[in-house]
Image (cartoon, rainbow, N blue to C red):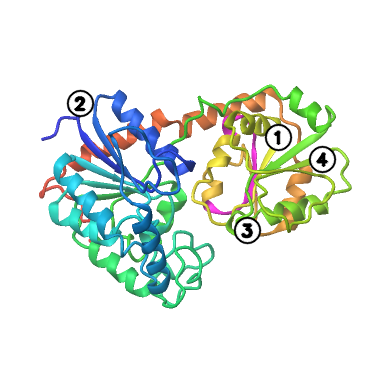
Amino acid sequence: MFEANKRMKVLIINVAAYSGSTGKITSGLYNYLKTQGHLVKVCYRGIKEERADDPDFVPLANRAGFYLSVILARLTGLEGHFSFSSTRKLKLLVKEFEPDVIQLYNIHGNYIRSYAFLKYLKKRGIPVVYSMLDEFPYMGKCPYPEDCEKFKVECNHCPKKKAYPESWLFDTSRYLFHKKECIYSGFDKLVFTGPPFVCKRAKESYLLKDCDVRELYEPFNFDDYFYPRETERLREELGFDADDRVVLCASGTAPRKGGKYFIEIADKLKDEPHLKFIFIGYNRNDWEFPDNVVVRGFIKDQNELAEYLSLADAYVCTSVGDTTPSVCLCALGCGTPLIGFEYGGVMDCAPNEYGTYVPLRNVEAMAVAVKRARKKTVSDIDQIREYAIGTFSQNSVYAKQIAIYNEIINRTDDNQISSYRG
């Protein structure tokens, strides 16, 4: 029996170590586990982000192998299938480190042979917690199905064949769907976690409907950057009056993020003189913006981003495919309420008390909601931040995660929950 307070050896595997929302989750869990006295190692892709200067952080991919894997994946439709050397490196580390539990996050991104690696873990009987930062675990191919519901029966004839992970020639969704089915079957020490929306979809899916699926929010660090800021200087710099209401969107320009909808809303409300729009993350030169929109590129400085989020009276999330949009959590930490589409991942971020939601892609309804947005008060700010910390703070989420680790490590043949098909 593994004692709850005994030092664990935990191996974290994610595509990113530090960068982006997934990387922050990786490093956050690592730091939390270390402060609790556990032994921790992190394996990550090591391409498209600066490598960590820490022996506990092990980059798996090399540049030549990674780009060869990407090209072959696009030709064949087999994402990650050709990442042989990085998968060998990962297996060797598992043998050497002998982890008590393995924490999986995003295992797509052309850096490991995810199917072969899962099969390897299943054979060795290593406890695995697979946290769903997207919907890839129960899909044949894609991480964000949006309106497609084939995953409930069988992925095939994928409507997103040319979307990430891109396939130029072949539709491999059905083949990969059943490959996952074989791997999950009989994998007794495997637990899936995710926010409520993802868990609901997972339980509706063919692949995970009888698996051990637990609700667990994505963790977020509010203390370093995302707390309410003084905004008088920024308001003056932007030329906004004290009675102007400000709505902000930091979606960038990726289609799934829906930034175009925000521009349409601003155009519909351009005759509202005391309603100001700010769009953050513009990285193109072919969009047209109405005069009532302040446009900014990607803001790397998190203090500056927090200042903009604090200035806003509402954060407008136009995403049509995220599981837990991290920028929504950033906004809540700054005391700013949400306006978004009725898409589960967005609605999971805040209850109706702190969020207003309209039917998916209904720009008219969202424009009405934006027009009705009121200036937030000090009381609003305090209540929203208190909710955010109580729900998504790292300490709260990671403590629950460790409890799951202890449980699955102690799971024996007599008390195992069958992880597939009852």
**Residue 218 seen by the camera:** no
Q: Which mark is residue 5?
A: 2
Separation of disc 2 and disc 1 at Cα? 44 Å
Q: Which mark is residue 275?
A: 4
316 vs 283, nearest the viewer: 283
The residues tagged by marks 4 and 1 sit, at their Cα atoms, a distance apart of: 11 Å
Mark toward the start of the polypeptide (4 vs 1): 4
In terms of sequence position, does the residue under pointer 2 or pointer 1 come before the other? Answer: 2
The residue carrying mark 1 is: 312
Q: Which region of the structure is painted magenta?
A: 332-344
Q: Quadrant of the C terminus?
A: bottom left
Lower sequence index among marks 3 and 1: 1
Give the residue pinned by disc 3. Answer: 360
Instruction: Look at the numbered disc 4 and give the secondary structure of its residue.
Output: strand
Query: Which badge, 2 or 3, is on the more N-terminal residue?
Result: 2
Q: Position of residue 147 (x, y in %)?
A: 54, 65
Q: Residue at point 64% right, 36% down?
A: 337
Q: Residue at x 49, y 50 (%)?
A: 323
